[in-house]
Amino acid sequence: MLSHHEIATLMLVRDADRRLHEFDPDVLALRRYELVEVRRQRSGDGSPIELTARGHELLRRLRMEGASEPQCE
């Protein structure tokens, strides 16, 4: 079960309006649950942390995912 901090972090990753550190305890927990992944990036564009298909699906089920986001099957 996710804590309220982890759910809030998941929403921050979705919104990508704030840069999160990949070693933040909540990000590490979300990685363990395979809800986010850290990608190696070039030239500092965007956040290196992004939602996985499972992360999108969880937010969709919580009705926090926008209709424009990819739907997972």
Image (cartoon, rainbow, N blue to C red):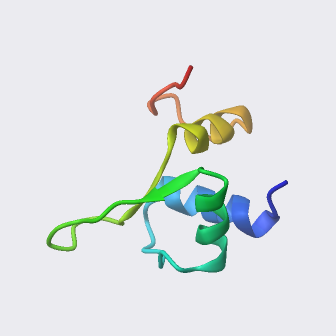
Residue 52 to residue 17: above or below: above
Foreground residue, 50 or 29?
A: 29
Residue 44 to residue 2: above or below: below
Residue 23 x/y as whole percent: 53, 80
Most extreme residue toward the top is 73
The N terminus is located in which quarter?
bottom right
Residue 63 to residue 8: above or below: above
**What is the number of callouts on the image?**
0
Q: Residue at x 59, y 50 (%)?
A: 35
Q: Residue at x 67, y 66 (%)?
A: 29
Foreground residue, 44 or 34?
A: 34
Residue 25 x/y as whole percent: 65, 78
Residue 22 to residue 71: above or below: below
Q: Residue at x 24, y 65 (%)?
A: 41
Q: Residue at x 47, y 56 (%)?
A: 37
Residue 60 in the figure: left or right of residue 70: right
